[in-house]
Image (cartoon, rainbow, N blue to C red):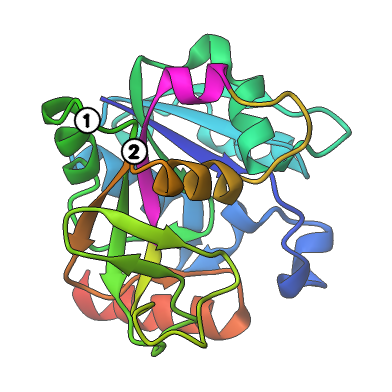
Amino acid sequence: MQAVVLAGGLATRMRPHTLTVPKSMLEVAGRPFVDWQLERLAECGFDEVVMCIAHLGDQIRDHVGDGSARGVKVTWAEEGPTLLGTAGALRAALPLLADEFLVTYGDSYLPFDYADPLRILEQEHDCDGVMAIFKNDGKWDVSNVKSDGAWVVSYEKGGGLADPAFDHIDYGATALRRGVIAGSAPEVMGLDALQRDLSQRKRLRACVARARFFEIGSPEGLAELDAYLRRVT
């Protein structure tokens, strides 16, 4: 199984730390975050990881290498000096993508089976993507998904605060078919635009996660994950 990690962002909310250190290399529970993330993917059965890098990406590459020390084979895709957006980063990695793959973010740590969305995608032929979602009810972040349990009925990146039916949140892992990326527009674009399009066309199934997500995109999020990992490991 293949996972793609989007690790090229500028991480502006974590400045000044991320002016000199990429977010994936921030220390969490005594280790660079990327180590925790890659080992979680390996535990879930992923044997190949494509790392999409940009901002200070050489530091991540120098640390991770070929990934063998973390139980996976890592290949590298670089955006170059101009950031392409999350979907653009996937387009840049197109030659490396499997027919079906899981994409996650370089600041997400998810205590669920990362392989579940990919299994659903492989089993169901009436969809082009499977988004992991969590019944958030606005607790951990702004809820942005309306779901009937099987499908992502509606997805709005900024949240659907006016509509209480938006009670789930994008968990941070989506399985996709390679053709979705191959057929996407070449301009700079966020992955959220592709996900919204798939949901509008009823091509985006849901995979409901049961445990809260963690992220290191904010100082508060990093502190919460640090405490969690020190407690469970």
Residue 145 in the image, given as x and y percentages of width and height = 39, 67
Under mark 2, the amino acid is: Arg
User: What residue does disc 2 label?
Assistant: 203
Q: In the figure, residue 59 lies in which quadrant?
A: top right
Q: Quadrant of the C terminus?
A: bottom left
Residue 58's place in the image compared with 17, above or below, is above
Which residue range is magenta in the image? 171-183
Separation (CA) of disc 1 from disc 2: 7 Å
Q: Are marks 1 and 2 in contact (CB under 8 Å)?
A: yes
The residue closer to the viewer here, 157 or 84, is 157
Q: How many marks?
A: 2
Q: Is residue 116 magenta?
A: no
Q: Residue at x 22, y 32 (%)?
A: 121
User: What residue does disc 1 label?
Assistant: 126
Helix or strand or loop: what does disc 2 sit on?
A: loop
- Residue farthest to the front, as pictured: 201
Q: Residue at x 40, y 75 (%)?
A: 225
Q: In the figure, residue 111 lies in which quadrant?
A: bottom left
The residue closer to the viewer here, 154 or 217, is 154
Residue 104's place in the image compared with 107, above or below, is above
Helix or strand or loop: what does disc 1 sit on?
A: loop
